[in-house]
Image (cartoon, coloured by chain):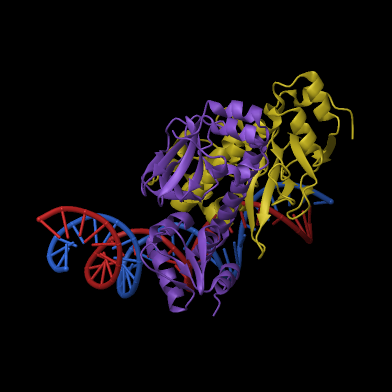
Chain colours: A yellow, B purple, C red, D blue
DNA sequence: CGAGTGTTTGAGACATTTCAACGATAGTGG
DNA sequence: CCACTATCGTTGAAATGTCTCAAACACTCG
Protein backbone atom coordinates (compact mmCIF):
# COMPACT_ATOMS: atom_id res chain seq x y z
CA UNK A 1 0.00 0.00 0.00
CA UNK A 2 1.35 3.38 -0.95
CA UNK A 3 0.39 7.03 -1.05
CA UNK A 4 -1.75 7.87 -4.05
CA UNK A 5 -2.16 11.09 -5.90
CA UNK A 6 -5.70 12.11 -6.81
CA UNK A 7 -4.57 12.92 -10.32
CA UNK A 8 -3.92 9.24 -10.90
CA UNK A 9 -7.58 8.45 -11.19
CA UNK A 10 -9.12 11.87 -11.67
CA UNK A 11 -9.20 11.37 -15.41
CA UNK A 12 -11.25 8.19 -15.33
CA UNK A 13 -14.99 8.18 -16.09
CA UNK A 14 -15.86 6.44 -12.90
CA UNK A 15 -14.57 9.28 -10.76
CA UNK A 16 -15.41 12.17 -13.00
CA UNK A 17 -17.30 14.95 -11.24
CA UNK A 18 -16.12 14.05 -7.74
CA UNK A 19 -14.73 16.75 -5.53
CA UNK A 20 -11.36 16.36 -3.85
CA UNK A 21 -12.82 15.42 -0.51
CA UNK A 22 -14.92 12.58 -1.89
CA UNK A 23 -12.07 11.42 -4.03
CA UNK A 24 -9.80 11.23 -0.99
CA UNK A 25 -12.43 9.22 0.84
CA UNK A 26 -12.63 6.82 -2.07
CA UNK A 27 -8.87 6.51 -2.24
CA UNK A 28 -8.30 6.10 1.48
CA UNK A 29 -8.76 2.34 1.69
CA UNK A 30 -7.27 1.56 -1.72
CA UNK A 31 -4.46 -0.88 -2.34
CA UNK A 32 -2.04 -0.80 -5.24
CA UNK A 33 -0.49 -3.77 -6.96
CA UNK A 34 2.02 -4.15 -9.76
CA UNK A 35 1.44 -7.10 -12.06
CA UNK A 36 3.98 -8.86 -14.24
CA UNK A 37 2.77 -10.44 -17.47
CA UNK A 38 1.06 -13.69 -16.60
CA UNK A 39 0.26 -12.81 -12.99
CA UNK A 40 -3.18 -13.81 -11.76
CA UNK A 41 -5.24 -11.18 -9.96
CA UNK A 42 -7.96 -13.59 -8.93
CA UNK A 43 -9.18 -16.97 -10.09
CA UNK A 44 -12.57 -18.26 -11.13
CA UNK A 45 -14.47 -19.38 -8.06
CA UNK A 46 -12.43 -17.41 -5.55
CA UNK A 47 -14.45 -15.56 -2.92
CA UNK A 48 -15.06 -12.05 -4.22
CA UNK A 49 -13.40 -10.10 -1.44
CA UNK A 50 -12.13 -7.20 -3.53
CA UNK A 51 -13.04 -5.13 -6.56
CA UNK A 52 -10.57 -3.42 -8.85
CA UNK A 53 -9.65 -0.59 -11.14
CA UNK A 54 -6.94 -0.97 -13.74
CA UNK A 55 -4.60 2.00 -13.89
CA UNK A 56 -2.21 0.86 -16.56
CA UNK A 57 -1.63 -2.18 -18.73
CA UNK A 58 -3.97 -4.82 -20.04
CA UNK A 59 -5.73 -7.75 -18.37
CA UNK A 60 -7.35 -10.84 -19.82
CA UNK A 61 -10.57 -12.20 -18.29
CA UNK A 62 -11.15 -15.89 -19.01
CA UNK A 63 -13.59 -18.59 -18.06
CA UNK A 64 -12.71 -22.26 -18.13
CA UNK A 65 -15.24 -24.96 -18.87
CA UNK A 66 -15.45 -28.09 -16.71
CA UNK A 67 -13.50 -29.96 -19.38
CA UNK A 68 -10.72 -27.41 -19.53
CA UNK A 69 -11.54 -25.32 -22.58
CA UNK A 70 -10.91 -21.62 -22.17
CA UNK A 71 -13.09 -18.74 -23.32
CA UNK A 72 -11.93 -15.14 -23.23
CA UNK A 73 -14.64 -12.98 -21.72
CA UNK A 74 -12.94 -9.67 -22.42
CA UNK A 75 -9.81 -7.60 -22.12
CA UNK A 76 -9.62 -4.91 -19.47
CA UNK A 77 -7.99 -1.60 -20.32
CA UNK A 78 -6.80 1.37 -18.23
CA UNK A 79 -9.59 3.15 -16.36
CA UNK A 80 -11.89 0.14 -16.34
CA UNK A 81 -13.25 -1.52 -13.23
CA UNK A 82 -13.28 -5.30 -12.99
CA UNK A 83 -13.99 -7.97 -10.46
CA UNK A 84 -17.03 -6.00 -9.30
CA UNK A 85 -18.78 -9.21 -8.30
CA UNK A 86 -19.83 -7.68 -5.00
CA UNK A 87 -21.77 -4.93 -6.79
CA UNK A 88 -23.53 -7.54 -8.90
CA UNK A 89 -24.51 -9.51 -5.84
CA UNK A 90 -22.15 -12.41 -6.36
CA UNK A 91 -20.16 -14.13 -3.66
CA UNK A 92 -17.41 -15.39 -5.94
CA UNK A 93 -15.63 -14.35 -9.13
CA UNK A 94 -17.11 -15.84 -12.29
CA UNK A 95 -13.79 -15.76 -14.15
CA UNK A 96 -10.03 -15.62 -13.86
CA UNK A 97 -8.11 -12.40 -14.48
CA UNK A 98 -4.53 -12.53 -15.71
CA UNK A 99 -2.18 -9.77 -16.80
CA UNK A 100 -1.72 -9.81 -20.58
CA UNK A 101 1.04 -7.25 -20.17
CA UNK A 102 2.78 -5.44 -17.31
CA UNK A 103 0.04 -3.70 -15.39
CA UNK A 104 -0.78 -1.55 -12.40
CA UNK A 105 -4.07 -2.00 -10.57
CA UNK A 106 -5.98 -0.56 -7.64
CA UNK A 107 -8.22 -2.62 -5.40
CA UNK A 108 -10.72 -2.11 -2.63
CA UNK A 109 -11.87 -4.74 -0.17
CA UNK A 110 -15.48 -5.63 -0.93
CA UNK A 111 -16.61 -4.48 2.52
CA UNK A 112 -16.00 -0.92 1.43
CA UNK A 113 -18.47 -1.05 -1.45
CA UNK A 114 -21.60 -0.14 0.51
CA UNK A 115 -19.90 2.77 2.26
CA UNK A 116 -18.37 4.09 -0.94
CA UNK A 117 -21.69 3.91 -2.74
CA UNK A 118 -23.65 5.60 -0.01
CA UNK A 119 -21.10 8.39 0.19
CA UNK A 120 -20.99 8.73 -3.56
CA UNK A 121 -24.22 7.52 -5.21
CA UNK A 122 -22.87 8.44 -8.61
CA UNK A 123 -20.58 5.46 -8.22
CA UNK A 124 -23.49 3.07 -8.55
CA UNK A 125 -24.85 4.88 -11.58
CA UNK A 126 -21.47 4.98 -13.26
CA UNK A 127 -20.93 1.30 -12.55
CA UNK A 128 -24.38 0.59 -13.91
CA UNK A 129 -23.51 2.31 -17.16
CA UNK A 130 -20.23 0.46 -17.37
CA UNK A 131 -21.87 -2.90 -16.77
CA UNK A 132 -24.55 -1.92 -19.28
CA UNK A 133 -21.91 -1.31 -21.91
CA UNK A 134 -20.43 -4.71 -21.19
CA UNK A 135 -23.84 -6.32 -21.49
CA UNK A 136 -24.28 -4.75 -24.88
CA UNK A 137 -20.92 -5.97 -26.00
CA UNK A 138 -21.79 -9.46 -24.79
CA UNK A 139 -24.99 -9.38 -26.83
CA UNK A 140 -23.04 -8.22 -29.84
CA UNK A 141 -20.78 -11.22 -29.49
CA UNK A 142 -23.73 -13.55 -29.07
CA UNK A 143 -25.31 -12.14 -32.20
CA UNK A 144 -22.09 -12.55 -34.12
CA UNK A 145 -21.52 -16.10 -32.94
CA UNK A 146 -25.09 -17.01 -33.79
CA UNK A 147 -25.24 -15.52 -37.26
CA UNK A 148 -21.77 -15.11 -38.70
CA UNK A 149 -19.19 -17.47 -40.05
CA UNK A 150 -15.73 -17.73 -38.55
CA UNK A 151 -14.06 -15.27 -40.90
CA UNK A 152 -16.47 -12.44 -40.18
CA UNK A 153 -16.37 -13.11 -36.44
CA UNK A 154 -12.59 -12.89 -36.51
CA UNK A 155 -12.82 -9.71 -38.58
CA UNK A 156 -15.14 -8.09 -36.03
CA UNK A 157 -12.93 -9.21 -33.16
CA UNK A 158 -9.74 -7.90 -34.72
CA UNK A 159 -11.43 -4.58 -35.48
CA UNK A 160 -12.64 -4.35 -31.90
CA UNK A 161 -9.12 -5.03 -30.63
CA UNK A 162 -7.76 -2.38 -32.95
CA UNK A 163 -10.33 0.07 -31.68
CA UNK A 164 -9.93 -0.70 -27.97
CA UNK A 165 -6.19 -1.15 -27.85
CA UNK A 166 -4.90 0.07 -31.16
CA UNK A 167 -1.91 2.34 -31.58
CA UNK A 168 -2.27 4.23 -34.85
CA UNK A 169 0.79 4.08 -37.09
CA UNK A 170 1.66 5.71 -40.36
CA UNK A 171 0.30 2.83 -42.39
CA UNK A 172 -2.07 0.98 -40.10
CA UNK A 173 -3.09 0.17 -36.56
CA UNK A 174 -1.05 -1.99 -34.22
CA UNK A 175 -2.74 -3.79 -31.34
CA UNK A 176 -0.48 -2.68 -28.54
CA UNK A 177 -0.38 -5.79 -26.37
CA UNK A 178 0.43 -9.43 -27.12
CA UNK A 179 -2.46 -11.33 -28.70
CA UNK A 180 -1.94 -14.87 -29.91
CA UNK A 181 -3.93 -16.80 -32.53
CA UNK A 182 -5.15 -18.92 -29.66
CA UNK A 183 -6.47 -15.79 -27.91
CA UNK A 184 -8.47 -14.79 -30.97
CA UNK A 185 -9.79 -18.33 -31.25
CA UNK A 186 -10.96 -18.14 -27.64
CA UNK A 187 -12.68 -14.85 -28.35
CA UNK A 188 -14.47 -16.03 -31.45
CA UNK A 189 -15.31 -19.61 -30.64
CA UNK A 190 -13.10 -21.30 -33.20
CA UNK A 191 -9.71 -23.00 -33.20
CA UNK A 192 -6.30 -21.43 -33.53
CA UNK A 193 -5.92 -23.32 -36.81
CA UNK A 194 -8.89 -21.60 -38.36
CA UNK A 195 -7.72 -18.23 -37.08
CA UNK A 196 -4.25 -18.83 -38.47
CA UNK A 197 -5.63 -19.73 -41.89
CA UNK A 198 -7.87 -16.67 -41.93
CA UNK A 199 -5.09 -14.29 -40.92
CA UNK A 200 -2.73 -15.84 -43.45
CA UNK A 201 -5.31 -15.33 -46.19
CA UNK A 202 -5.75 -11.72 -45.11
CA UNK A 203 -2.03 -11.19 -45.10
CA UNK A 204 -1.86 -12.43 -48.69
CA UNK A 205 -4.46 -9.83 -49.56
CA UNK A 206 -2.61 -7.08 -47.73
CA UNK A 207 -5.28 -6.52 -45.08
CA UNK A 208 -3.16 -7.32 -42.04
CA UNK A 209 0.35 -8.22 -41.04
CA UNK A 210 0.97 -11.06 -38.67
CA UNK A 211 3.74 -12.01 -36.34
CA UNK A 212 4.20 -13.80 -33.08
CA UNK A 213 1.44 -12.55 -30.75
CA UNK A 214 1.22 -9.49 -32.94
CA UNK A 215 -1.59 -8.06 -35.04
CA UNK A 216 -1.10 -5.13 -37.33
CA UNK A 217 -4.10 -3.96 -39.34
CA UNK A 218 -2.98 -2.40 -42.60
CA UNK A 219 -6.39 -1.76 -44.18
CA UNK A 220 -9.07 -1.22 -41.51
CA UNK A 221 -11.59 -0.02 -44.08
CA UNK A 222 -11.32 -3.11 -46.24
CA UNK A 223 -11.50 -5.27 -43.13
CA UNK A 224 -14.68 -3.45 -42.11
CA UNK A 225 -16.23 -4.17 -45.48
CA UNK A 226 -15.33 -7.82 -45.05
CA UNK A 227 -16.85 -7.82 -41.56
CA UNK A 228 -20.16 -6.37 -42.74
CA UNK A 229 -20.83 -8.13 -46.01
CA UNK A 230 -21.44 -11.83 -46.31
CA UNK A 231 -19.21 -12.11 -49.33
CA UNK A 232 -15.55 -11.26 -49.15
CA UNK A 233 -14.26 -7.94 -50.41
CA UNK A 234 -11.53 -7.91 -53.04
CA UNK B 1 -53.24 5.22 -16.97
CA UNK B 2 -55.12 3.71 -14.07
CA UNK B 3 -55.03 3.51 -10.31
CA UNK B 4 -52.51 0.97 -9.07
CA UNK B 5 -52.40 -0.95 -5.88
CA UNK B 6 -49.09 -1.12 -4.06
CA UNK B 7 -49.52 -4.82 -3.61
CA UNK B 8 -49.17 -5.28 -7.35
CA UNK B 9 -45.46 -4.70 -7.27
CA UNK B 10 -44.67 -5.06 -3.59
CA UNK B 11 -43.61 -8.64 -4.08
CA UNK B 12 -40.97 -7.92 -6.69
CA UNK B 13 -37.27 -7.82 -5.85
CA UNK B 14 -36.79 -4.41 -7.32
CA UNK B 15 -39.13 -2.82 -4.81
CA UNK B 16 -38.47 -4.99 -1.85
CA UNK B 17 -37.70 -3.05 1.32
CA UNK B 18 -39.41 0.15 0.23
CA UNK B 19 -41.85 1.82 2.56
CA UNK B 20 -45.35 2.74 1.42
CA UNK B 21 -44.54 6.37 0.89
CA UNK B 22 -41.60 5.69 -1.39
CA UNK B 23 -43.54 3.05 -3.22
CA UNK B 24 -46.34 5.51 -3.91
CA UNK B 25 -43.83 8.02 -5.21
CA UNK B 26 -42.44 5.39 -7.53
CA UNK B 27 -45.88 4.40 -8.71
CA UNK B 28 -47.20 7.92 -9.20
CA UNK B 29 -45.97 8.48 -12.76
CA UNK B 30 -46.44 4.87 -13.90
CA UNK B 31 -48.41 3.80 -16.94
CA UNK B 32 -50.06 0.42 -17.45
CA UNK B 33 -50.45 -1.40 -20.72
CA UNK B 34 -52.08 -4.65 -21.72
CA UNK B 35 -50.34 -6.58 -24.48
CA UNK B 36 -51.83 -9.15 -26.81
CA UNK B 37 -49.59 -11.91 -28.08
CA UNK B 38 -47.44 -10.47 -30.84
CA UNK B 39 -47.72 -6.84 -29.76
CA UNK B 40 -44.54 -4.82 -29.93
CA UNK B 41 -43.58 -2.77 -26.86
CA UNK B 42 -40.72 -0.99 -28.57
CA UNK B 43 -38.54 -1.64 -31.57
CA UNK B 44 -34.79 -1.82 -32.05
CA UNK B 45 -33.44 1.66 -32.67
CA UNK B 46 -36.42 3.51 -31.20
CA UNK B 47 -35.53 6.42 -28.90
CA UNK B 48 -35.44 5.06 -25.36
CA UNK B 49 -38.09 7.28 -23.81
CA UNK B 50 -39.45 4.76 -21.31
CA UNK B 51 -38.36 1.90 -19.12
CA UNK B 52 -40.54 -1.00 -18.07
CA UNK B 53 -41.52 -3.62 -15.54
CA UNK B 54 -43.39 -6.73 -16.57
CA UNK B 55 -46.24 -7.60 -14.22
CA UNK B 56 -47.62 -10.65 -15.94
CA UNK B 57 -46.98 -12.71 -19.04
CA UNK B 58 -43.84 -13.28 -21.09
CA UNK B 59 -41.93 -11.07 -23.50
CA UNK B 60 -39.37 -11.90 -26.14
CA UNK B 61 -36.37 -9.62 -26.71
CA UNK B 62 -34.82 -9.96 -30.16
CA UNK B 63 -32.13 -8.32 -32.21
CA UNK B 64 -32.12 -8.34 -35.98
CA UNK B 65 -28.96 -8.33 -38.03
CA UNK B 66 -28.57 -5.98 -41.01
CA UNK B 67 -29.35 -8.90 -43.31
CA UNK B 68 -32.53 -9.84 -41.50
CA UNK B 69 -31.52 -12.74 -39.28
CA UNK B 70 -33.03 -12.72 -35.82
CA UNK B 71 -31.35 -13.53 -32.53
CA UNK B 72 -33.27 -13.94 -29.30
CA UNK B 73 -31.54 -11.98 -26.57
CA UNK B 74 -33.74 -13.28 -23.73
CA UNK B 75 -37.23 -13.80 -22.44
CA UNK B 76 -38.63 -11.44 -19.84
CA UNK B 77 -40.72 -12.86 -17.00
CA UNK B 78 -42.99 -11.28 -14.38
CA UNK B 79 -41.18 -8.96 -11.99
CA UNK B 80 -38.34 -8.22 -14.37
CA UNK B 81 -37.42 -4.78 -15.64
CA UNK B 82 -36.60 -4.29 -19.30
CA UNK B 83 -35.91 -1.50 -21.71
CA UNK B 84 -33.72 0.18 -19.07
CA UNK B 85 -31.60 1.74 -21.79
CA UNK B 86 -31.70 5.09 -20.00
CA UNK B 87 -30.07 3.60 -16.91
CA UNK B 88 -27.32 2.11 -19.05
CA UNK B 89 -26.68 5.44 -20.72
CA UNK B 90 -28.14 4.58 -24.09
CA UNK B 91 -30.26 6.89 -26.21
CA UNK B 92 -32.06 4.12 -28.09
CA UNK B 93 -33.23 0.56 -27.52
CA UNK B 94 -30.76 -2.08 -28.67
CA UNK B 95 -33.49 -4.64 -29.37
CA UNK B 96 -37.14 -5.22 -30.12
CA UNK B 97 -39.54 -6.46 -27.44
CA UNK B 98 -42.60 -8.43 -28.41
CA UNK B 99 -45.21 -10.21 -26.29
CA UNK B 100 -44.75 -13.98 -26.47
CA UNK B 101 -48.05 -14.38 -24.62
CA UNK B 102 -50.74 -12.09 -23.24
CA UNK B 103 -49.01 -9.73 -20.87
CA UNK B 104 -49.39 -6.76 -18.57
CA UNK B 105 -46.62 -4.22 -18.21
CA UNK B 106 -45.81 -1.04 -16.34
CA UNK B 107 -43.76 1.77 -17.80
CA UNK B 108 -42.16 5.01 -16.68
CA UNK B 109 -41.03 7.82 -18.94
CA UNK B 110 -37.24 7.95 -18.99
CA UNK B 111 -37.23 11.48 -17.57
CA UNK B 112 -38.34 10.05 -14.25
CA UNK B 113 -35.31 7.81 -13.83
CA UNK B 114 -32.99 10.36 -12.20
CA UNK B 115 -35.66 11.49 -9.75
CA UNK B 116 -36.64 7.96 -8.84
CA UNK B 117 -33.04 6.96 -8.27
CA UNK B 118 -32.22 9.96 -6.14
CA UNK B 119 -35.30 9.38 -4.02
CA UNK B 120 -34.59 5.69 -3.78
CA UNK B 121 -30.88 4.90 -4.20
CA UNK B 122 -31.58 1.23 -3.67
CA UNK B 123 -33.18 1.28 -7.09
CA UNK B 124 -29.81 1.78 -8.75
CA UNK B 125 -28.23 -0.98 -6.69
CA UNK B 126 -31.08 -3.38 -7.42
CA UNK B 127 -30.92 -2.59 -11.11
CA UNK B 128 -27.17 -3.09 -11.01
CA UNK B 129 -27.63 -6.56 -9.56
CA UNK B 130 -30.27 -7.37 -12.14
CA UNK B 131 -28.10 -6.21 -15.01
CA UNK B 132 -25.22 -8.11 -13.47
CA UNK B 133 -27.24 -11.30 -13.52
CA UNK B 134 -28.04 -10.72 -17.16
CA UNK B 135 -24.38 -10.14 -17.93
CA UNK B 136 -23.52 -13.44 -16.33
CA UNK B 137 -26.17 -15.20 -18.32
CA UNK B 138 -24.85 -13.61 -21.49
CA UNK B 139 -21.37 -14.90 -20.69
CA UNK B 140 -22.78 -18.33 -20.05
CA UNK B 141 -24.33 -18.29 -23.50
CA UNK B 142 -21.10 -17.07 -25.06
CA UNK B 143 -19.20 -19.86 -23.36
CA UNK B 144 -21.72 -22.44 -24.54
CA UNK B 145 -21.75 -21.19 -28.10
CA UNK B 146 -17.97 -21.15 -28.16
CA UNK B 147 -17.35 -24.58 -26.71
CA UNK B 148 -20.40 -26.81 -27.11
CA UNK B 149 -22.00 -28.56 -30.02
CA UNK B 150 -25.55 -27.83 -31.06
CA UNK B 151 -27.16 -30.65 -29.09
CA UNK B 152 -25.66 -29.58 -25.77
CA UNK B 153 -26.49 -25.95 -26.41
CA UNK B 154 -30.08 -26.86 -27.08
CA UNK B 155 -30.11 -29.00 -23.96
CA UNK B 156 -28.87 -26.13 -21.82
CA UNK B 157 -31.35 -23.75 -23.40
CA UNK B 158 -34.31 -26.06 -22.88
CA UNK B 159 -33.29 -26.64 -19.28
CA UNK B 160 -33.02 -22.90 -18.74
CA UNK B 161 -36.49 -22.41 -20.20
CA UNK B 162 -37.85 -25.13 -17.96
CA UNK B 163 -36.26 -23.46 -14.97
CA UNK B 164 -37.31 -19.91 -15.76
CA UNK B 165 -40.77 -20.60 -17.09
CA UNK B 166 -41.52 -24.19 -16.23
CA UNK B 167 -44.74 -25.38 -14.71
CA UNK B 168 -44.08 -28.63 -12.84
CA UNK B 169 -46.41 -31.48 -13.73
CA UNK B 170 -46.87 -34.94 -12.38
CA UNK B 171 -44.47 -36.44 -14.90
CA UNK B 172 -42.35 -33.56 -16.10
CA UNK B 173 -42.00 -29.83 -16.60
CA UNK B 174 -43.99 -27.87 -19.15
CA UNK B 175 -42.64 -24.59 -20.49
CA UNK B 176 -45.67 -22.42 -19.90
CA UNK B 177 -45.56 -20.14 -22.93
CA UNK B 178 -45.34 -20.81 -26.66
CA UNK B 179 -41.81 -21.60 -27.85
CA UNK B 180 -41.22 -22.66 -31.43
CA UNK B 181 -38.32 -24.64 -32.86
CA UNK B 182 -37.33 -21.44 -34.62
CA UNK B 183 -37.20 -19.66 -31.25
CA UNK B 184 -34.82 -22.25 -29.85
CA UNK B 185 -32.73 -22.01 -32.99
CA UNK B 186 -32.48 -18.25 -32.49
CA UNK B 187 -31.44 -18.76 -28.89
CA UNK B 188 -28.75 -21.32 -29.64
CA UNK B 189 -27.34 -20.12 -32.93
CA UNK B 190 -28.44 -23.01 -35.10
CA UNK B 191 -31.24 -23.66 -37.58
CA UNK B 192 -34.76 -24.80 -36.85
CA UNK B 193 -33.95 -27.96 -38.80
CA UNK B 194 -31.19 -28.93 -36.44
CA UNK B 195 -33.36 -28.15 -33.42
CA UNK B 196 -36.19 -30.22 -34.85
CA UNK B 197 -33.91 -33.20 -35.43
CA UNK B 198 -32.47 -32.94 -31.94
CA UNK B 199 -35.87 -32.71 -30.27
CA UNK B 200 -37.18 -35.60 -32.36
CA UNK B 201 -34.25 -37.72 -31.30
CA UNK B 202 -34.87 -36.80 -27.65
CA UNK B 203 -38.52 -37.63 -28.02
CA UNK B 204 -37.57 -41.09 -29.31
CA UNK B 205 -35.48 -41.53 -26.18
CA UNK B 206 -38.27 -40.33 -23.92
CA UNK B 207 -36.46 -37.21 -22.72
CA UNK B 208 -39.00 -34.68 -23.94
CA UNK B 209 -42.35 -34.42 -25.62
CA UNK B 210 -42.84 -32.07 -28.54
CA UNK B 211 -45.80 -30.35 -30.02
CA UNK B 212 -46.58 -27.17 -31.83
CA UNK B 213 -44.80 -24.36 -29.95
CA UNK B 214 -44.75 -26.63 -26.96
CA UNK B 215 -41.94 -28.16 -24.94
CA UNK B 216 -42.51 -30.68 -22.23
CA UNK B 217 -39.49 -32.05 -20.42
CA UNK B 218 -40.14 -35.58 -19.21
CA UNK B 219 -36.71 -36.39 -17.81
CA UNK B 220 -34.89 -33.25 -16.62
CA UNK B 221 -32.18 -35.27 -14.92
CA UNK B 222 -31.25 -37.24 -17.99
CA UNK B 223 -31.32 -34.03 -20.01
CA UNK B 224 -28.95 -32.46 -17.49
CA UNK B 225 -26.55 -35.35 -17.87
CA UNK B 226 -26.67 -34.88 -21.62
CA UNK B 227 -26.03 -31.15 -21.22
CA UNK B 228 -22.95 -31.68 -19.07
CA UNK B 229 -21.18 -34.60 -20.67
CA UNK B 230 -19.72 -34.49 -24.14
CA UNK B 231 -21.04 -37.91 -24.99
CA UNK B 232 -24.73 -38.63 -25.01
CA UNK B 233 -26.42 -40.37 -22.12
CA UNK B 234 -28.37 -43.54 -22.73
C1' DC C 1 22.55 -23.08 -29.45
C1' DG C 2 18.84 -25.76 -27.68
C1' DA C 3 14.22 -25.74 -25.65
C1' DG C 4 9.87 -24.02 -25.57
C1' DT C 5 6.18 -21.79 -27.38
C1' DG C 6 3.57 -19.98 -31.02
C1' DT C 7 2.44 -20.41 -36.02
C1' DT C 8 1.60 -22.44 -40.55
C1' DT C 9 -0.27 -25.76 -43.61
C1' DG C 10 -2.27 -30.14 -45.42
C1' DA C 11 -5.62 -33.89 -45.66
C1' DG C 12 -9.42 -36.30 -43.99
C1' DA C 13 -13.41 -36.53 -40.85
C1' DC C 14 -17.54 -34.72 -39.31
C1' DA C 15 -21.29 -31.72 -37.61
C1' DT C 16 -24.33 -28.66 -39.28
C1' DT C 17 -26.32 -26.06 -42.96
C1' DT C 18 -28.70 -25.77 -47.12
C1' DC C 19 -32.07 -27.12 -50.30
C1' DA C 20 -36.27 -29.39 -50.95
C1' DA C 21 -40.51 -31.56 -50.15
C1' DC C 22 -44.02 -33.14 -47.37
C1' DG C 23 -47.03 -33.45 -43.15
C1' DA C 24 -49.49 -31.68 -39.25
C1' DT C 25 -51.89 -28.35 -36.63
C1' DA C 26 -54.44 -24.17 -35.43
C1' DG C 27 -56.95 -20.40 -36.76
C1' DT C 28 -60.30 -18.05 -40.13
C1' DG C 29 -64.14 -17.18 -42.81
C1' DG C 30 -67.85 -18.76 -45.54
C1' DC D 1 -68.93 -27.13 -39.24
C1' DC D 2 -65.96 -27.75 -42.90
C1' DA D 3 -62.75 -26.14 -46.13
C1' DC D 4 -58.97 -23.15 -46.61
C1' DT D 5 -54.75 -21.19 -45.51
C1' DA D 6 -50.90 -19.89 -42.96
C1' DT D 7 -47.75 -21.36 -39.84
C1' DC D 8 -45.02 -24.72 -37.76
C1' DG D 9 -42.76 -29.08 -37.78
C1' DT D 10 -40.52 -33.22 -39.79
C1' DT D 11 -37.35 -35.63 -42.57
C1' DG D 12 -34.07 -36.78 -46.45
C1' DA D 13 -29.98 -35.97 -49.26
C1' DA D 14 -26.34 -33.21 -50.80
C1' DA D 15 -23.15 -29.40 -49.95
C1' DT D 16 -19.86 -27.17 -47.03
C1' DG D 17 -17.41 -24.85 -43.29
C1' DT D 18 -14.80 -25.98 -39.59
C1' DC D 19 -12.51 -29.24 -36.62
C1' DT D 20 -9.32 -32.80 -35.80
C1' DC D 21 -5.17 -34.97 -36.47
C1' DA D 22 -0.52 -34.55 -37.89
C1' DA D 23 3.75 -32.60 -39.02
C1' DA D 24 6.88 -29.07 -39.87
C1' DC D 25 8.41 -24.39 -39.28
C1' DA D 26 9.83 -19.85 -36.95
C1' DC D 27 10.83 -17.11 -33.51
C1' DT D 28 12.29 -15.91 -28.75
C1' DC D 29 14.39 -16.54 -24.55
C1' DG D 30 17.69 -18.29 -21.43
Image-based side of B113 in relation to A65, left or right: left
Q: Residue at x 54, y 80 (%)?
A: B234
Q: Is residue A180 visible to the viewer in this orientation of the structure? A: no
Image-based side of C24 in relation to B60, left or right: left
Q: Quick one: which residue is furthest to the bottom in this view?
A: B234
Residue B65 image offset from top left, x and y in percent: 41, 44
Image-based side of A132 in relation to A219, left or right: right
Image-based side of B21 in relation to A143, left or right: right
Q: Residue at x 61, y 35 (%)?
A: B23
Image quarter (top left, top right, bottom left or bottom right) of the C terminus of chain A = top left
Q: Nearer the viewer, residue A171 or A22?
A: A22
In this view, A10 is above or below A131: above
Quadrant in which residue B33 is drawn: top left
Residue A35 image offset from top left, x and y in percent: 80, 41
In this view, A171 is above or below A207: above
Residue A179 image offset from top left, x and y in percent: 64, 45
Q: Nearer the viewer, residue A137 or A78?
A: A137
Q: Nearer the viewer, residue D5 or A102?
A: D5
Residue A91 image offset from top left, x and y in percent: 74, 51
In this view, B9 is above or below A44: above
In this view, B62 is above or below A166: below
Q: Nearer the viewer, residue A186 or B80?
A: B80
Amino acid sequence: MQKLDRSLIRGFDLFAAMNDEDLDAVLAPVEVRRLAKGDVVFAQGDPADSFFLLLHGRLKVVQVTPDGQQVIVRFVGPGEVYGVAVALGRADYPGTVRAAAESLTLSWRSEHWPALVSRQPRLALNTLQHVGARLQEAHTRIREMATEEAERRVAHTVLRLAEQAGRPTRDGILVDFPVSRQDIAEMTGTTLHTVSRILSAWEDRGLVEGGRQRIFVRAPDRLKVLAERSEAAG
